[in-house]
Amino acid sequence: MISKQNAKYRSILFLLILSGLAVWIFTREKSLNKNQIEAPIVDTKVTQELSGETEGSFSLKPDQKAAKEEIKVETGGLTPADQKKWLLITESINNPNDNEPRVDSELKDLSNEMHVLIREAYSKTKMENRNGRGFLAFLIARDLKTLEDVRFLESIYQEPPCVGMSDCSKQEDADPHIASINQTSLNYPQYVALYQFERRLDAHPELLQDPAFRAEVEAMLREAKQFPAPEISARVAALQEKLGL
Amino acid sequence: MLSIILPLITSTAFALTFDKNVPQDIQAQMVADLNFIGTLTGTRQTALHQQIFTAVDGKKYSEFFNSRVKSVGLSACGGGAAVACVQPMFAPDKMWLTQNFIKFSHPQIARMMVVFHEARHTETKNGNWGHATCPRPFLDEQGKNKVSIWTGAPLAGEPACDITPLGSYGSSTIMLKNIAMNCDNCAEKVKMDADLYATDQIGRISDAAAKKKMVDDFKTKRKI
């Protein structure tokens, strides 16, 4: 039989143990929380709050910028509206986050001056910035208007192939398990140009009615077919057949 | 006392834990990428997408990912040009990112394709959806041997194919194809990228019947 005094001591001991356990759990949680970032959770609003972005907003955070390169082109002749568009373009070239709605609402039907700048920016963007170069090719091909635009697309297939994600001039270990994503990214500008070019012509077949434009397109596709990536060549062949070129 | 202890125990049930050695910029990009996926919406999906993910819906994608991956570490993933990997025998619910995750200039949806491909590999109950050996010969649509473009290394004989639509290549292809076709709040570039990378990935489905099933699936759209 347990004496009243022993029962009292046992109760105190139990409460002490319980308190110690609570303190231990609390301090452990505090330690783990240093390294935890909330995963995207069911509540979309909370997800956006965690990222610091509100719906429809677009802001570069310093810790989200990859090796940012500055593309220097002369923008003095742009209208204020085009200056604003140019700022969006330069932000997007280095932005690893692609789902920016303003690219669709504000970067279509661009002025000739903007096309000139985009083409120039492409030539000044690092080869290894595959997403950035692809983005610029996307803008031109989606908005294809002039012979200069077609010649620009042709030049994309004349550039030396990028053979390594770290350094376009050096091949990397091609583990076949992961190679496929890299092979697409290495040829990303070439894929994008064809993809958007086809859609542009689907939407505006009248472009090919201009003999000069048609001749330029034929030359571009001939060049693209010679690009040393079999998948690109195959897509060009399919497009040539579709367009009757 | 128990009412105080229990909430403390369960408060971290759905948090993605990063190892301390994962650089802050990699953590931030992973969170940004997952947040992006978590906000996608769509009103249709194909039958195979319904089977694997249910709807084209960020909440469903988040649930899919969160139910499989609990923590993220930093690893070279065997060296080479990988961006992510899993080691299910060693840590079944952990994903490893490499420095290439932010160093390589991949489109955002391509990074997520890799992440969801790897997340599928964590499914121990499904044998981790191990890859099939690519057949010998392994030919493309033009009848030529599929090789690594710049090294010329053949894919034939490599463990880098799938013979089911439901494996890692198949499921991530199905996800991206559905995003390309059915995402309502994706920018045109995102949808294009999803289409481009899905088209490339389907080339890893080496079983003709499985591939046909996916191609036929992509021709359909099904309302919720």
Image (cartoon, coloured by chain):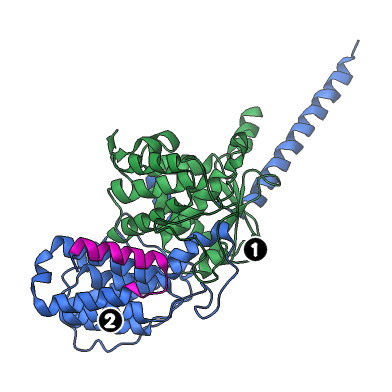
Chain colours: A blue, B green
Q: Is residue A237 magenta?
A: yes
Locate residue A207, reporting x and y percent.
11, 70
Type of the residue with mark 1: Ala
Residue at horizontal 70%, vertical 37%? A22
Where is residue A37? Give x, y as percent: 54, 52
* Mark carried by residue B27: none
Among the 4 quarters of the image, the one containing residue B1: top right
Residue named by callout 2? A119
**Chain containing mark 1:** B
Q: How many residues crowd mark 1 within 10 Å: few (<14), some (14–19), many (20+)? A: some
**Separation of marks 2 and 1 at Cα, in angstroms:** 36 Å
In the image, residue A18 above or below residue B204: above
Disc 2 packing (10 Å; few <14; some 14–19; many ≥20): some
Q: Amino acid at mark 2?
A: Arg
Q: Position of residue A196 (x, y in %)?
A: 26, 65
Task: Say which residue appears at 44% left-offset and 53% top-offset.
Answer: B203
Numbered disc 2: secondary structure: helix
- Note whether A129 is above or below B56 in the view shown: below
Start-end of magenta stretch: A225-243
Residue appearing at x 52%, y 65% in the figure: B148
> Residue A9 or A64: which is nearer the viewer?
A64
SS class, disc 1: loop
- Report the side of A139 relative to A180 (left or right): left
Question: Which disc, if any, is residue B76?
Answer: 1
